[in-house]
Image: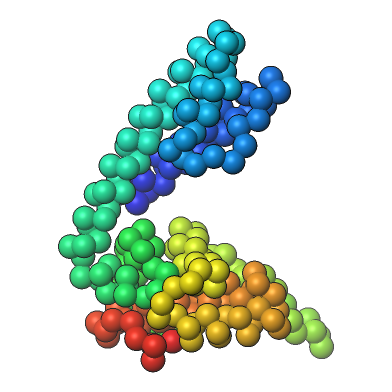
Amino acid sequence: MLTARKLVQKALHEVEMSLRGVLRGFGFKVGKVAPAQFEARIKELVEGHPNLETIAASLLAVRATLRREFNGFEKRLRAMARSDTRARLLMSVPGVGTIVALTYAAAIDDPARFTSSKTVGAHFGLTPTRYQSGETDRSGRISKIGDGSVRAALYESSHIIITKPIKGCTDLKSWAMRIAKRAGMKKAKVALARKLAVIMHRMLADGTTFTTQSA
């Protein structure tokens, strides 16, 4: 279900970008527009241009179908999350919603597979690689091994925690901001994503909801 949702989401994005690209070639700029207003904006731009009207009508029809299917997946996944004990548990973490919770729970499967929660970050490629040669010993970029969808989901949650005013995540946000001051915002988001991976595994292993002490 998660994979199918992602495929539809990607196709939807590609159709919208294609429409923007076609119109840009004729000097029409769509600009920043809300999803609900996208179709009206396209029709406004192509009005009076028969060929563009034909192209737009066809691609907008495809977009409408994809949006309907995407919304259907969203509805089904929300229902799945409500009935899934693990997903409900994970959604008690600030910044973790339906998709992140289901993605993480599906990837972890059995928490007992990991001997320690601290190893989960490395499993999903969220730990820095190390370069050692002679007297040189430095950390590089994260390894990016393992499930990329989990990395993306955890990074999305860390971005929300850092950039949005969300209740219940003061300690996590403060911790990440201290890293941001020292190493930059991007590394802070990765570090927080790794911390979330550890916290969420511990929650699944213990069957406990998130508390400020969890951080």
Furthest residue toward top: 50
Residue 181 placed where, x, y %?
69, 81
Q: Which residue occupies 34% across, 86% down?
A: 211
Q: How is the image coloured?
A: rainbow
Against 139, residue 37 (above or below) is: above
Residue 98 placed where, x, y %?
33, 61
Q: Which residue occupies 46% across, 58% down?
A: 149
Query: Is 69 left or right of 80, judged from the image as shown?
Result: right
Against 51, residue 123 (above or below) is: below
Residue 29: in sight, yes or no? yes
Against 101, residue 188 (above or below) is: below
Residue 194 placed where, x, y %?
51, 76
Q: Quadrant of the C terminus?
A: bottom left
Residue 126: in sight, yes or no? no
Residue 52 placed where, x, y %?
57, 14
Query: Is 161 left or right of 29, judged from the image as shown?
Result: left
Query: Is 80 left or right of 14, judged from the image as shown?
Result: left
Furthest residue toward bottom: 213
Q: Which residue occupies 49% across, 63% down?
A: 156
Q: Which residue occupies 46% across, 18% down?
A: 57
Against 48, residue 128 (above or below) is: below
